[in-house]
Image (cartoon, helix red, strand yellow):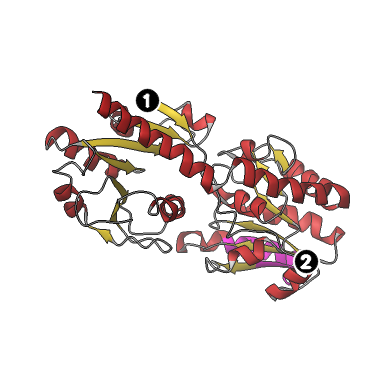
Amino acid sequence: MTSKMSPELIVTNLHRNFTGVSATIDQLLRFQELNYDIMLSGSPLPTVRTKPVSIWSALAISRRAPCKRRHILWHVRRNCEMFWAIFARDVLRFPIKTVFTSAAIRRHSAFPRFLISKMDAVVATSPKAACFVPNVVAIVPHGVDTARFRVAENRDMAWQATGYPGLGGIATVGRVRPEKGTDLFVDAMIRELPKRPGMTALVIGKTEVRFARFQADLERRISEAGLSERILFTGEIAKEELPKILSALKLLVAVPRYEGYGMTPLEAMASGTPVVVSDTGAYATFVANGKSGLLVPVDDLERVCKAIGEILDDLDLASAMAQGARETAEKEFSVARELQGVGQVYDRLWQHEAAA
């Protein structure tokens, strides 16, 4: 529900590009707008109906408290968004309460630490992230839309429908760059694909100009290994096409050297695809029950190759993990659970103001 006057919740997306943070806002807001009187401030989001307004419009409307509330909640995720929320609350003295979602698993620099310390409530997306920020009132993982990402009726037929060669696929999804471990995936595929003649590997993601030489070097190594027709760089894939590909894979490999949170393993899991993930971001929590995939140390090619082999060479294990991945996504990491967890934080702030 949206209103031109006195929203109870303002969600900010003050970044021109559609980033990983934008994607998590987009997914949650699509459900939140059915439950709250919402205003979106900043850049538009692809799947939400709420039309964005400028930060100036958000500030102007925040001068007055919403109907039946003493405060408007501002839910922010970035430094600049925290700044504007604090400015409106503490300098302009508008009736605002602030909620910040933190996914980073590293110590923030001085200015972000100062901004975070001024938040009324901080939501961490993982236990690791909670260790690096103050004022944490809840740990609420980002959730995956389990209706959008779902299990294919027939994985082999689903792979054929993608149009990619071979009898099955392995993929990594993310920007092509060293931080994302693209080179680890490629090196693992150079070792593992010759043992599995029917498999094709996909590197799915955009390559920025500054990493063009990095990709060119990977393509050279692939060519020297004679695998240019079996390890393919797809570029960025349309948002609506990704669920079809993830549900057709035999395995998703996500081995970045650093990740703040990381949604692609969850999207694969919701699609019934086992995962091999490095121990960064929230990945350890995704496979903590041992049902969904395998965790490997960061930047450890030998362990990546071993984990890939363990799953692909054991059909019973792969089948059990496919089922376990879907169950884990539904029970522990659905967007419905995120909506509930964040909603409890909002309610706590609103209830606190009612008691004041």
* Residue 204 showing in the rendered view: yes
CA distance separating discs 1 and 2: 47 Å
Determine whether, in the image, residue 148 is placed left or right of residue 14: right
Mark 2: which amino acid?
Asn
Mark 1: which amino acid?
Asn
> What's the residue at 30%, 33% (across, down)?
350
Q: Quadrant of the N terminus?
A: bottom left
Which residues, given as a range, are shown in magenta? 215-232
* Residue 261 showing in the rendered view: no
Q: Quadrant of the C terminus?
A: top left
Find residue 146 and report its image quarter: bottom right
> What's the residue at 47%, 37% (across, down)?
341
- The dot on residue 135 is 1
Q: How many marks?
A: 2
- Please name the residue that numbered disc 2 is placed on: 154
- Find residue 26 and report its horizontal and vertical position in percent: 42, 55
Q: Foreground residue, 22 or 335?
A: 335
Instruction: Tell me if mark 2 has few (under 14), some (14-19) or many (20+) residues whose alpha carbon lies within 10 angstroms of its own.
Output: few
The tag earlier along the polypeptide, 1 or 2, is 1
Instruction: Tell me if mark 1 has few (under 14), some (14-19) or many (20+) residues whose alpha carbon lies within 10 angstroms of its own.
Output: some
